[in-house]
Image: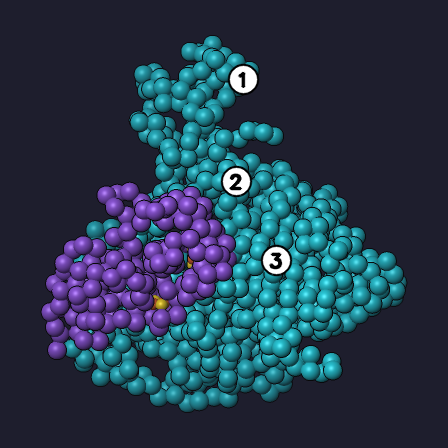
């Protein structure tokens, strides 16, 4: 496969790397428009209360204040990212449901005045009883957080595949264990921001927003403002990380647009760091009960799950999150019989949302931990158990997934080898250990037309290539990957390609960055658009080269005849030839793409093939536990990873390394601590995620598969690798000190306590 | 209550009217339009706002603008010379030491101060000195590799 590709598969810098290192890359908060006003949001101080009255008169009278709005004034239209689960207003109407719920917003000539003004707003509350734990919230008589939602259960899912009872009866060992995953904040370095401007000529409101999903944001914003979608234009500047937290619309988007329309001036809302912790989204805390039946030699026969997710005050992505946590239990292991029962439960706490892995990390943690516990009881090697149960490509899948390529079994062996499994597992001195975790993740979603991507590839008169895509680069390098795909198809260099992205007024529809679908979905759209350009160019130069258009190849800046590279024409000259023939310019290719499947599904009701392809990975950790301080040091993390063919291995590695740090945070350090609904650690100092001091040695092994659906064989590479680091680390802690931790995070206090109890 | 001060930033002198409690970060971003310096927390906990004052790294969100009078301030915009990226910047580009890029200006300014003081740091020393700069995207590996890569590139010249 040597030099099969010229641009794809190469470690190329991001297109915007230079702008990011010299300070010229513009994020939303960097935008300064003439006459811009500044906004601030008033948030609830109570976890659950009726709003009896909001008196804004003092705030409105403050010099420099240009506008105040409360929930009572905004249109009565709820929004939410999943249509069936809309339950949120940009500003609360009638009642607040958590500390941080938005009540009102002000807009003033500067930030200081806006901050002073929100303090002057007087709210009369009637406090209501609150509930903070999902297991309490489901009880009869618990306070009702949303009218009409019985037992605070806003989404329930029950799925049965095969015969679980029969499987348990046939099992040699059945184990039932309980697990808990904590709330984790995404903590992107860039706080959420929005700038809006009313464009009186087009009669549009233009919103620049730190968003992962410009087109869904446009839809939600238009709906809540009750204006046509065509009257909203969303532009995504550089986004400083998202990890799922920037998938939803937030009050800052709505309020910036609202004031810009009312006042005719540009308006900016930027959240403070504590608002990011309290008032945006977090990973759902989840209680999980898992019952697994195995044969004597470690084959999984059946699994049963009972999951309670703590959704906090609103739904956000609830149904999708629960469905993913269910269906992805059936990869990367072959689970022939499965029963899953899951509940998304409201509490008076910060809101759960999509976060890297989206419902799967919680479930993965439970399963991967339990596999190790059962391996021990069966006296089997945890690596062998994983290998033995690996799902295979082409195998019938109980949930209807179609798995075209799968490097999982190989990844188990490769990761184990890289960490020195045979020499180390069970053989290291007390305090040191190794552990494994496996996982799989979708590459976007199949067959839903609103989850389609468009692309336009245009070749200019100077032979430069411009790609219009709606894909949302939030720092992962989506624009670079798309440009690499286009460059490869046209046989030009990456330098020749410009990307114009994520402007709902200029670029084609794209659902945005979630579910790890960007490379496959937007990449395929760009690929097909570029191919259509190439086809016309080939048709144009075929005569000159005395060849059939089908026999031409574009590579490294020239178009040549297959097998006879000496018969060629440079790309730029080919474009000249196209122009001399008086063919219509510009040379444009367009495409719309969605992942096709015969059995489409959202997974809520019927099973089916959720994604066009699935990534697979095994991660292996080596840790050292300081038995005096209880601190865990991750010494090494080895990852063997099947993400198809990586379009840009450097960016793939970057995703992987970032997920390892994220997974370490989840395993060892991070926890959004609340007391009676109040977040106690809403700052970087108190929250604490990994720094340079904690990063381990990282080794990455690429298990390359050539996926038939993805562009150039690519699959997802951004999320799956955050699923298995946490269980790998906690499994390694068991190997180190012989204690099973089934709750996250495994803090030094908990380790010391456990060591104490062991004595 | 506002006072006129003169700040020397990236070799230019700017006269600005500031309130006594205004941070250097706010003045750089809001008054001088130097938005390359980022606000990640405004509480001294992330390093995104790092700038150089007389060659040493400071968190501009913790520094009052009035206290920066008389110092030579360098921000990320002032690091490249004559359109050429600084070797540190080049290294970050080529070795993929960034993803979203929000932490990057602060990281590069801290790294500049670190390397000026210790041109050939050990990995341990570098990790310690960079620990105040948070990054949520990269897992730091390529950040550290980029800084190490720059030490070779920079040689004696800085
Ligand atoms: S903004 Fe200054 S340290 Fe975070
Ligand atoms: S690159 Fe995104 S925070 Fe560092």
Residue drawn at the location 60% of the way across and 79% of the way down: A749
- Disc on the earlier residue, 1 or 2: 1
Quadrant position of residue A345: bottom right
Residue underneath mark 1: A562
Residue reaching furthest to the front: B156
The chain coloured cyan is A
Asked if marks 3 and 2 touch (Cβ < 8 Å), the reply is no
Residue underneath mark 2: A647
Same chain under badges 3 and 2? The reply is yes
Eye-nearest disc, 3 or 2? 3
Quadrant of the rendering where the N terminus of chain B is positioned? bottom left
Marked residue chain, label 3? A
- Disc on the earlier residue, 3 or 2: 3
> Are there few (<14), some (14-19), or many (20+) residues within 10 Å of tag 1?
some
Same chain under badges 3 and 1? The reply is yes
Which quadrant of the picture is home to ligand 2? bottom left
| Res A306 seen here | no
The kind of secondary structure element at disc 2 is: loop
The colouring scheme, among rainbow, by chain, secondary structure or one colour, is by chain
The kind of secondary structure element at disc 1 is: loop
Disc 3 residue: CB within 8 Å of ligand 2: no
Residue underneath mark 3: A636
Residue A55 percent coordinates (x, y): 28, 84
Residue drawn at the location 68% of the way across and 72% of the way down: A742
Residue drawn at the location 45% of the way across and 40% of the way down: A12
Does A688 sit left or right of A71 as displayed? right
Mark 3 vs mark 1, CA separation in Å: 47 Å
Asked if marks 1 and 2 touch (Cβ < 8 Å), the reply is no
- Disc on the earlier residue, 3 or 1: 1
Residue A25 percent coordinates (x, y): 32, 51
Display colour for chain B: purple
């Amino acid at each position: 496969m040597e030099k099969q590709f010229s641009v794809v598969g190469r470690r190329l810098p991001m297109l915007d790397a230079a702008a990011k290192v010299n300070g010229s890359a513009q994020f939303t908060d960097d935008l300064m428009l003439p006459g811009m006003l500044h906004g601030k949001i008033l948030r609830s101080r109570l976890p659950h209360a009726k709003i009896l009255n909001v008196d804004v008169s003092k705030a409105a009278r403050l010099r420099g204040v240009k506008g105040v709005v409360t929930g009572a004034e905004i249109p009565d239209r709820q929004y939410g990212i999943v249509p069936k689960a809309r339950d949120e207003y940009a500003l609360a109407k009638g009642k607040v449901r958590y500390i941080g719920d938005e009540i009102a917003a002000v807009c003033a000539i500067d930030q200081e005045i806006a901050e002073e003004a929100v303090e002057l707003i007087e709210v009369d509350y009637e406090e209501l009883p609150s509930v903070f734990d999902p297991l309490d919230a489901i009880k009869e008589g618990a306070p009702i957080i949303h009218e009409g939602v019985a037992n605070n259960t806003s989404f329930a899912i029950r799925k049965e595949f095969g015969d679980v009872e029969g499987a348990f009866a046939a099992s040699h060992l059945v184990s039932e264990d309980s697990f808990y995953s904590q709330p984790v904040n995404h903590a992107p370095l860039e706080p959420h921001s929005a700038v809006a401007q009313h464009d009186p000529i087009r009669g549009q409101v233009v919103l620049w927003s730190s968003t992962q999903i410009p087109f869904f944001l446009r839809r939600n914003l238009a709906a809540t403002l009750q204006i046509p979608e065509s009257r909203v234009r969303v532009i995504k500047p550089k986004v400083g990380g998202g990890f799922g937290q920037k998938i939803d619309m937030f009050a800052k988007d709505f309020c910036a647009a609202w004031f810009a329309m009312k006042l005719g001036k540009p308006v900016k809302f930027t959240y403070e760091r504590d608002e990011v912790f309290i008032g945006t989204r977090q990973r759902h805390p989840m209680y999980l009960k898992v019952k697994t039946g195995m044969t004597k030699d470690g084959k999984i026969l059946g699994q049963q799950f009972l999951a309670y997710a703590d959704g906090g005050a609103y739904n956000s992505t609830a149904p999708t999150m629960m469905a993913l946590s269910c269906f992805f239990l059936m990869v990367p292991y072959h689970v022939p019989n499965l029963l899953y029962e899951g509940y998304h439960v409201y509490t008076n706490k910060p809101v759960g949302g999509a976060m890297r892995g989206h419902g799967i990390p919680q479930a993965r943690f439970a399963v991967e931990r339990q596999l190790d516990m059962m391996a021990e009881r069966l006296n089997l090697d945890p690596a062998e158990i994983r290998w033995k149960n690996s799902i295979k490509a082409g195998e019938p899948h109980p949930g209807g997934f179609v798995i075209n390529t799968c490097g999982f079994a190989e990844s188990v062996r490769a990761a184990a080898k890289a960490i020195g499994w045979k020499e180390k597992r069970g053989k290291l001195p007390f305090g040191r250990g190794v552990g494994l975790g496996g996982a799989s993740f979708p590459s976007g979603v199949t067959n839903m037309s609103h989850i389609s991507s468009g692309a336009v590839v245009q070749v200019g008169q100077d032979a430069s290539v411009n790609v219009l895509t709606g894909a949302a680069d939030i720092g992962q390098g989506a624009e670079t990957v798309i440009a690499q795909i286009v460059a490869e198809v046209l046989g030009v260099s990456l330098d020749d390609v410009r990307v114009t992205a994520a402007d709902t007024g200029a670029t084609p529809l794209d659902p945005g960055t979630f579910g790890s679908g960007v490379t496959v979905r937007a990449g395929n759209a760009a690929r097909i658009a570029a191919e259509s350009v190439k086809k016309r160019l080939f048709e144009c130069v075929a005569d000159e080269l005395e060849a059939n258009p089908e026999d031409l190849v574009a590579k490294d800046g020239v178009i040549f005849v297959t097998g006879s590279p000496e018969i060629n024409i440079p790309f730029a000259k080919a474009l000249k030839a196209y122009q001399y023939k008086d063919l219509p310019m510009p040379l444009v290719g367009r495409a719309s793409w969605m992942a096709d499947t015969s059995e489409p599904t959202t997974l809520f009701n019927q099973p089916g093939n959720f994604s066009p392809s699935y990534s697979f990975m095994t991660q292996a950790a080596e840790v050292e536990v300081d038995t005096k301080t209880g601190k865990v040091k991750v010494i090494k993390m080895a990852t063997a990873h099947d993400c198809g063919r990586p379009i840009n291995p450097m960016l793939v590695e970057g995703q992987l390394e970032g997920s390892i740090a994220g997974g370490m945070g989840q395993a060892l350090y991070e926890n959004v601590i609340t007391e009676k609904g109040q977040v106690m650690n809403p700052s970087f100092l108190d929250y604490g995620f990994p720094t340079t001091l904690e990063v381990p040695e990282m080794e990455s092994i690429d298990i390359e598969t050539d996926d038939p659906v993805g562009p150039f064989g690519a699959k997802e590479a951004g999320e799956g690798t955050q699923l298995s680091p946490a269980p790998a680390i906690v499994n390694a802690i068991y190997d180190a000190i012989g204690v099973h931790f089934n709750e996250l995070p495994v803090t030094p206090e908990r380790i010391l306590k456990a060591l104490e109890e062991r004595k | 209550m506002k006072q006129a001060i003169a700040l020397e930033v990236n070799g230019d002198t700017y006269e600005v009217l500031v309130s006594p409690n205004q941070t250097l970060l706010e003045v750089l971003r809001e008054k001088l339009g130097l938005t390359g310096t980022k606000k990640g927390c405004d509480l001294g906990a992330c390093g995104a706002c790092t700038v150089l004052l007389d060659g040493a790294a400071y968190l501009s969100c913790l520094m009052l603008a009035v206290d920066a009078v008389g110092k030579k301030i360098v921000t990320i915009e002032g690091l490249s010379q004559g359109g050429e990226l600084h070797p540190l910047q080049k290294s970050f580009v080529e070795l993929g030491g960034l993803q979203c890029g929000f932490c990057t200006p602060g990281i590069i300014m801290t790294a500049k101060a670190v390397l000026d003081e210790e041109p050939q740091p050990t990995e341990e020393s570098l990790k310690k000195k960079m620990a105040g700069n948070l990054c949520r995207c990269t897992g730091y590996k390529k950040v550290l590799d980029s800084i190490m890569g720059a030490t070779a590139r920079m040689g004696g010249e800085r």
